[in-house]
Image (cartoon, grey):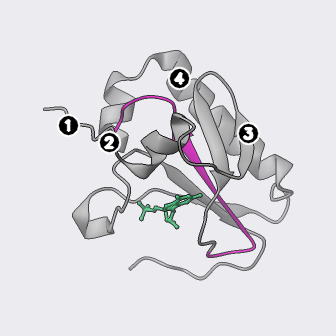
């Protein structure tokens, strides 16, 4: 079933405005902001504005407009950060084996340098 959502997680707090973030983009469906501990010259997180723990949760239960808007924002952020030509990586950690730290679905956008073939 749908995993329980923890309203105290750090991204929920950012969405409620309780914790500041360095905003890159925002619309009705999603928020993009710089990662606090960047692993590349560009490291932006994109999160949906809903209570979704995982990718499966988000894609199974979010309205289609929210899903479309989310992925459009991912592409728009990459473009606005100047990554379109050189390329970039989109990554999402899901659950314990992937080391997901924040239980609110998010994708990382990495770019601005040559990225290694990181698999594990
Ligand atoms: P995960 O391992 O869950 O995929 O990644 C969580 C990411 O969120 C990490 O890259 C971490 O640096 C970032 N992060 C954690 N807390 C905060 C915060 O309070 N603000 C911002 N901007 N990023 C955070």
Q: N-terminal of the two: label 1 or label 4?
A: 1
Answer with left or right where residue 29 lies relative to residue 75.
Answer: left
Q: Are marks 2 and 1 in contact (CB under 8 Å)?
A: yes
Residue 48 lies within the magenta run: yes
Q: Is residue 13 above or below residue 120?
A: above
Image coords of residue 93 (percent x, y): 39, 60
Measured in 3D between alpha carbons, the distance from the residue under mark 1 to the one under mark 3, in whole angstroms, is 27 Å
Measured in 3D between alpha carbons, the distance from the residue under mark 4 to the one under mark 3, in whole angstroms, is 15 Å
State the mark number for residue 4.
Answer: 1
Tell which tag, 2 or 4, sits nearer the viewer.
2
Q: N-terminal of the two: label 4 or label 3?
A: 3
Kindly identify the residue that appears in the image at 60 percent across and 82 percent down: 116
Kindly identify the residue that appears in the image at 68 percent across and 75 percent down: 40
Q: Are marks 4 and 3 in contact (CB under 8 Å)?
A: no
The residue carrying mark 3 is 25
Quadrant of residue 35 in the image? Answer: bottom right
Quarter of the figure with the N terminus = top left
Q: Residue furthest front?
A: 18
Q: N-terminal of the two: label 2 or label 1?
A: 1
Kindly identify the residue that appears in the image at 38 percent across and 80 percent down: 120
Residue 96 lies within the magenta run: no
Label 3: which secondary element: strand
Tell which tag, 1 or 4, sits nearer the viewer.
1
State the mark number for residue 53.
Answer: 2
Q: Is residue 100 above or below residue 60?
A: below
Label 1: which secondary element: loop
Within-10-Å neighbours for mark 1: few <14, some 14–19, many 20+: few
Image coords of residue 77 (percent x, y): 74, 46
State the mark number for residue 36.
Answer: none
Within-10-Å neighbours for mark 3: few <14, some 14–19, many 20+: some
């Amino acid at each position: 079933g749908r995993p329980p959502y923890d309203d105290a997680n750090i991204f929920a707090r950012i969405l409620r405005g309780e914790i500041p973030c360095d905003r890159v983009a925002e619309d009705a469906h999603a928020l993009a902001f710089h990662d606090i501990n960047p692993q590349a010259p560009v490291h932006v997180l994109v999160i949906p504005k809903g209570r979704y723990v995982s990718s499966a949760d988000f894609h199974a239960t979010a309205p289609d407009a929210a899903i479309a808007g989310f992925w459009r924002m991912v592409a728009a952020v990459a473009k606005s950060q100047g990554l379109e030509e050189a390329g970039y990586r989109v990554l999402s950690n899901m659950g314990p084996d992937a080391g997901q730290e924040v239980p609110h679905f998010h994708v990382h956008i990495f770019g601005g340098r040559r990225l290694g073939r990181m698999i594990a």
